[in-house]
Amino acid sequence: MKKFVSLTSVLLIVLMSLALGACDGSTSKVQNVSSGGYMVIPVSELSSSVRFYPVNVDGKRMEVMAAKDSSGRVRTAFNTCKVCYDSGKGYYKQSGNKIVCQNCKNAFTVSDLETSSDGCIPWPIYSSDKTIVNGEVRISYDFLKRSASIFANRKK
């Protein structure tokens, strides 16, 4: 009976951890993108809450943020701050309707994504850096590869 209770407790903890992980806006599957390929984000998964999509490009782990603004436009950015990225803690988490840098605490809304390339902001992925085809946001291997250096010191 003790083994059954212990096993049940462990299973319950694992299930609760998975459920909490599913609520943080992230996806659990890391996409591996190789030469000639692209990262795919289904537009149907996006809402006004930011979702975080991990991607692995030639062994470098990166993360893309994606959401829809109030007009339904898809907004994307790398989950790293243009100023704080080399601190190792320049990544974002959503708090209410704000996206907050975990290093400098600057906060932004989904509508702020892709609006500027200067200052302490999420590193943008502009329309010219992606395509939206058949209900999917596609970000090319080549663009991801060129951007990998901004994740060099990431500690998340």
Image: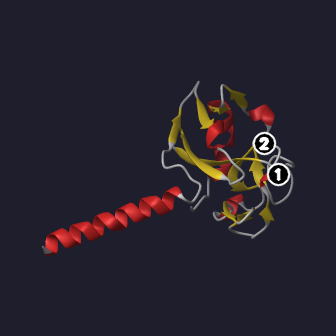
Residue drawn at (52%, 39%) of the image? 31
x, y percent for residue 149? 66, 47
Q: Residues within 10 Å of mark 1 (few under 14, many from 20)?
A: some
The dot on residue 154 is: none
Question: Looking at the image, is 145 positioned above or below residue 63?
Answer: above
Residue 90 picture quarter: bottom right
Question: Looking at the image, is 67 positioned above or below residue 102?
Answer: above
For label 1, the residue is 111
Residue drawn at (86%, 48%) of the image? 115
Does label 2 or label 1 sit earlier along the sequence? 2
Residue drawn at (60%, 35%) of the image? 39
Residue 104 picture quarter: bottom right
Nearest to the observer: residue 135 or residue 132: 135
Most distant residue in the bottom direction? 2
> Please, what is the three-letter code of the amino acid marked with disc 1?
Ser
User: Marks 2/1: CA distance?
Assistant: 10 Å
x, y percent for residue 125? 75, 42
Label 1: which secondary element: helix
The dot on residue 72 is: 2
x, y percent for residue 50? 68, 53
Question: Looking at the image, is 15 positioned above or below residue 145?
Answer: below
Residue 102 picture quarter: bottom right
Label 2: which secondary element: loop
Nearest to the observer: residue 71 or residue 29: 71
> Please, what is the three-letter code of the amino acid marked with disc 2?
Gly
Number of callouts: 2
x, y percent for residue 103? 70, 69
Q: Residues within 10 Å of mark 2 (few under 14, many from 20)?
A: few
